[in-house]
Amino acid sequence: MGQYVAPIRDMQFVLHEFLKVEDQLKELPAHAETDADIINAVLEEGAKFTSEVLFPLNHSGDREGCTHDPVAKTVTTPKGFKEAYKQYVEGGWAALACDPEFGGQGLPVVLNNSFYEMLNSSNQAWTMYPGLSHGAYECLKEHGTDEQKRLYLPKLVSGEWTGTMCLTEPHCGTDLGMLRSKAIPEADGSWTITGNKIFISAGEHDMSDNILHLVLARVPDAPEGSKGISLFLVPKFLPKEDGSVGERNPITCGAIEEKMGIHGNSTCQMNLDGAKGWIIGQPNKGLNAMFVFMNAARLGVGMQSLGLTEIAYQNALTYAKDRIQMRSLSGVKAPDKQADPIIVHPDVRRMLLTAKAYAEGARAFTSYIALQIDRELNHPDEEVRKECADEVALLTPIVKAFITDNGWIATSEAMQVYGGHGYISEWGMEQYVRDARINLIYEGTNTIQSLDLLGRKILMDNGAKLRKFGDKIRAFVEENGTDEAMSEFVTPLGDLGEKVGKLTMEIGMKAFQNQDEVGAAAVPYLRVVGHMVYSYFFAQMAKIALEKQDSGDNFYKAKLATARFYFARLQPETATLIRQARSGAASLMALDADLF
Ligand SMILES: Cc1cc2nc3c(=O)[nH]c(=O)nc-3n(C[C@H](O)[C@H](O)[C@H](O)COP(=O)(O)OP(=O)(O)OC[C@H]3O[C@@H](n4cnc5c(N)ncnc54)[C@H](O)[C@@H]3O)c2cc1C
């Protein structure tokens, strides 16, 4: 069932050479001691845990799925999941990047990011159980009371308890302003919550002692719409004062969904029948608090698709070197064999390189943003912290949508490399395609991410955040513009940067007349900006590779070839995307709904 070898060499390249992470971390007092030895040791140990413990459970977890007992209202996860989680907790992995004040190891987010990629390559469905805890931790840390932090954070940090996000209801997913779950205040300061949530990932399971549900509901007399939503902490078991697990709270799983992929993760219908909860933050400000969770989860979903892109690529590569079929058009390459390995064929290479380039682009991108989060949290200069926060806000919808769209493309191409064998479950490739598909949907569909980017993050901000990021690109283009060896990268980068500026202005002008112009342009627009970001990162990586291509280390030759492929074959789709984005709303809105 294939294999997983963590791409440590490329991770080290991204961290040490591309980001120069040790120098960057030295500027942050909290992480000044994190040196290359620590980073490399965590990568090595993480690679062992993920490839030896989690990866072997990926296919079996998919086949077996989760089991719901409707009488006991329990969910049993696939064989081995619980034991692997125990190892994860005992190994201290849950606590890696958490605050030492709550029992965390205090390592940087940028390092956790690489480990998180490994987790997702090995087993996305399993990783979602602890993955959601991370968002819950972030949210409670920022918006919880001191008492809530004292009682809950150490358990989330250690991994003894896991978290969920309970937003979606049957009649509303995107438009949370319509949600109906209700919360009634009690004299003791707690709230009684009733309602029905659907599609709750890891809503019920047998892997941890307790589950902390973060639930959106309405308080009495709440304003209509999204201004009337509050956030509550609703534990599966009510904790006792000493932190041990107490009485069962009536928040239970009514059913689990049958679904296309991620079968090892329980997607639960959750019923709140007068469950006891505590408010997080202020009444009616719940969506604001929940955004902390949602932003962490959006980055996490991008990482899921990076993980799948990498594992699908690795296995397709092995297969393409092994499978023989037909002869090369340019002459026999393996005369000792009956046919040539399929990796000789140009289009098989295109498929492999597409997955490789999207994996390497996403790795550079997510590592960059993770480092920006470390700087946002820990840089001594407030101005720098603010700049980093702005950039993370701008780039988050691109991480979510661009990487997951590319993950869908890449896993599908990797499956295609196998021909018919890719479609057969025995090889495991079809699972990656099925697992990848949800990433475009949950945590706000990719359409919603595109609207967030173009509408909220760019137009409502008069393009200020985008211009700041553009300044970095312009500086890089100016610095390298006269270097002939770099022109194949710098010219298309500079060109695309200018086009993005013009396109943004054009859409902004049209939007004054008709807001539907934003909705009509947003999806291709996000993809164009995504390519601008990747062009910037690939150009920087190509520069390092050019300098070291004669070092004798073939890694740099491969990096250069991948960057060249990216600019030759993937980035040019921006020409079509720009035309689509410019074509406006007219062709979409002309047809009356009843004439479709
Ligand atoms: C496996 C799985 C796990 C999930 N896990 C969780 C979880 O843990 N917690 C949780 O709360 N939810 C979870 N969800 C729910 C998920 O986040 C929602 O399904 C998703 O946000 C979309 O909501 P919806 O399904 O109601 O679709 P709808 O909101 O009904 O959207 C339908 C379509 O309309 C489009 N659309 C809607 N509004 C607009 C607009 N303004 N402009 C353009 N297009 C628009 C959408 O993009 C989509 O294509 C999960 C879902 C699944 C399938």
Image (tube, rainbow, N blue to C red):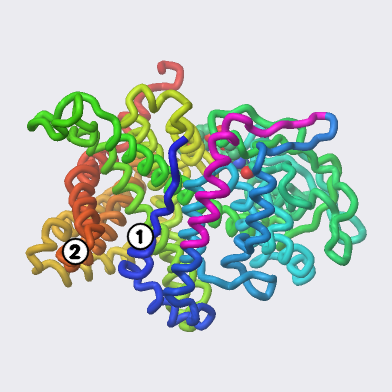
N-terminal label among 1 and 2: 1
Residue 475 seen anywhere in this rendered image of the structure: yes
Residue visible at 39% across and 37% down in the picture:
411
Q: Residues within 10 Å of mark 2 (few under 14, many from 20)?
A: few
Residue placed under numbered mark 1 in the picture: 9
Q: Nearer the viewer, residue 56 or 155?
A: 56
> Where's ligand 1: which quadrant?
top right
Residue farthest to the top, as pictured? 595
> Which one is in front in this view, the residue at disc 1 or the one at disc 2?
2
Instruction: Say left or right for 325 vs 217.
Output: left
Q: Amino acid at mark 1?
A: Arg
> Is residue 320 one of those drawn in magenta?
no
* Residue 544 drawn at (x, y percent): 22, 66
* Residue 141 drawn at (x, y percent): 66, 66
Instruction: Say left or right for 477 vs 191.
Output: left
- Name the quadrant containing residue 134: bottom right
Q: Nearer the viewer, residue 510 or 20?
A: 20
Q: Is the CB–ligand 1 distance for label 1 below 8 Å?
A: no
Residue visible at 68% across and 41% down in the picture:
179
Residue 332 vertical placement versus 500 (above, below): above
Residue placed under numbered mark 2 in the picture: 552
Secondary structure, mark 1, is helix
Residue visible at 74% across and 48% down in the picture:
218
How far apart are the alpha carbons under marks 1 and 2? 15 Å
* Residue 520 drawn at (x, y percent): 36, 38
Mark number for residue 529?
Answer: none
Q: Nearer the viewer, residue 6 or 16?
A: 6
Instruction: Say left or right for 372 vs 269.
Output: left
Q: Amino acid at mark 2?
A: Gly
Q: Which residues are magenta?
A: 44-70
Could you tell me how many numbered marks the image carries?
2
Secondary structure, mark 2, is loop
